[in-house]
Image (cartoon, rainbow, N blue to C red):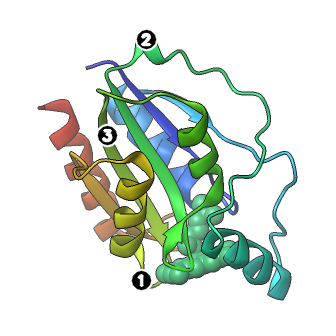
Amino acid sequence: MNTVIVYYSLEGNTDYAAKRIADITGADIIRLYPKKTYPDKGFRKFLFGGKSAVMAETPELEAYSFNSDKYERVIFGFPIWASNIAPPIRTFIKENNLIGKHISAFACQSGSGAEKAFEKLKACLNTDKLDYTLILIDPKLKPNEENNRKINEFCEALLHS
Ligand SMILES: Cc1cc2nc3c(=O)[nH]c(=O)nc-3n(C[C@H](O)[C@H](O)[C@H](O)COP(=O)(O)O)c2cc1C
């Protein structure tokens, strides 16, 4: 299945995972960048990012190139923000027609909230099903065997479907 990974990363963990998944599966990769960057340090990071996620904002994105006809499958990757999907993913979904695509997703978090965020992702996509999901704990910040094993299993499932 022709596959593209569409992801956002503020601090590099989702970027790390996206690149590993792309290496293993051969998927194309699109990194989203909001025009107005979120703060990446201290209290402001949690305040601005958290508020934006809770308000389900759709921040304007830098130009990206996505040819929908080329792909049968889209894998979304994002950090968990306040138990929600990171807002740039919402913008991408709003801007593109994904009807009929196979959708999978992976999320990076430091504690919990990914399951709730996957429900929000489904609502945003207007679907009741994600094919495969993967939850990682800060895979770049805290590299460990558990994260590597989970990434490999996720990729195996994708490659055999
Ligand atoms: C605004 C904000 C809100 C966050 N909310 C959560 C949360 O609800 N649950 C959680 O486990 N981690 C939360 N985190 C931590 C990140 O999800 C986690 O560190 C993730 O690996 C970061 O991915 P990134 O490096 O790709 O940005 C939050 C981080 C930020 C910046």
Disc 1 to disc 2, how far (Cα)? Answer: 35 Å
Q: Residue at x 31, y 40 (%)?
A: 103
Number of marks present in the image shown: 3
- What is the crowding at mark 1: few (fewer than 14 residues within 10 Å), some, or many (at least 20)? some
Locate the N terminus by quadrant: top left
- Residue drawn at x 29%, y 26% is 100
For the residue labelled by badge 2, is the local secondary structure a helix, a strand or a loop? helix
- What's the CA distance linking mark 1 and mark 3? 22 Å
Who comes first in sequence, dot 3 or dot 2? 2
Residue type at mark 3?
Answer: Ile
- Specify the quadrant that holds the C terminus: top left
* Residue 90 visible (yes or no): yes
Instruction: Please give the label number shown on residue 103.
Output: 3
Mark 3 packing: few (<14 Cα in 10 Å), some, or many (20+)? many
Name the side, left or right, on which 69 lies relative to 32.
Answer: left
Q: Which residue is mark 2?
A: 69
Q: Amino acid at mark 2?
A: Asp
Disc 3 + disc 2, Cβ < 8 Å = no
Mark 1 and mark 3 lie on one chain; the one further toward the N terminus is: 3
Q: Does the residue tagged 1 have its C-beta within 8 Å of any atom of ligand 1? A: yes
Residue 2 screen position, x and y as percent: 33, 18
Where residue 98 appears, as percent x and y from the top left, is 41, 30
* Amino acid type, mark 1: Ser
Residue of label 1? 112
Closer to the camera, 161 or 153?
Answer: 161
Q: Which mark is residue 87?
A: none
